[in-house]
Image (tube, rainbow, N blue to C red):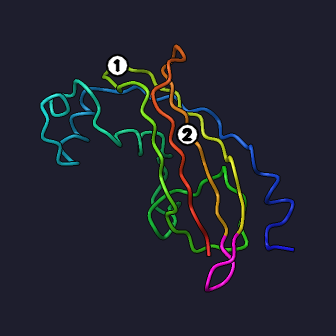
Amino acid sequence: MGILSEDVLAYIGRKAPARTEVVTRRDIRKYAIASGQTQRKYLDGDVAPPLFHVALFWDVVPRDELTPDGVSVDRLLPKFPLERAMAGGLDIRYHNLIRPGDVLIGNRTLTDIYEKSGRSGALIFYEVVLEITREDGTPVLTEKTTRLLR
């Protein structure tokens, strides 16, 4: 028997409430400058550069509600028996460009939780899929994030 309880595994398939965000030209331009973009289409804010979406749906919380690594607590996840988190992978599939004026809807689902044994002991992996669509249902991108805990 592993370290994952039935209570933890019951979270698989759980969905976070949908989030809606409006994309502005100013936000695109600020991100383009901050991320060192050089192409005019990004700097002018006509199209969002790759990875613009990453922080778009993050919660904005008071500083004292941030974890030690500077992010808010993800309420989609259960309390895991291991706590040291590391990046495991990121797979982003772009379907359409993000443009100023787009009303985007983000839907996050915890799609898998599993464990493996590593050299230093047990590891827990979990996967979260973020699907972003336009307000009319047009797909924009699908992102699968894999994290591991030890």
**Foreground residue, 120 or 58?**
120
- Name which of mark 1 and mark 2 comes first in the sequence: 1
Q: Is residue 3 magenta?
A: no
Name the front one of labels 1 and 2. Answer: 2
What residue do we see at 52% from left, 56% from top?
A: 72
Determine which of the numbered discs, if any, sits on residue 143 in the image.
none
View extreme (top): residue: 136
Left or right side of 11 for 21:
left
Look at mark 1 in the image and give the residue it sits on. 101
Q: Amino acid at mark 2?
A: Leu
Q: Quadrant of residue 18?
A: top right
Residue 78 position, x and y percent, is 72, 58
Residue 135 position, x and y percent, is 51, 17
Quarter containing the N terminus: bottom right
Left or right side of 17 for 85:
left
Residue 127 position, x and y percent, is 62, 52
What residue do we see at 62% from left, 76% from top?
A: 150
Left or right side of 39 for 70:
right
The magenta-colored residue range is: 116-123
Other residues around mark 2 within 10 Å, as few (<14) / some (14–19) / many (≥20)? many
Left or right side of 49 for 106:
right
Q: Amino acid at mark 1?
A: Gly
Mark 2 element type: strand
Magenta-colored segment: predominant secondary structure: strand
- Give the spatial CA distance, label 1 vs label 2: 20 Å
Q: Quadrant of residue 100?
A: top left
Look at mark 2 in the image and give the residue it sits on. 130
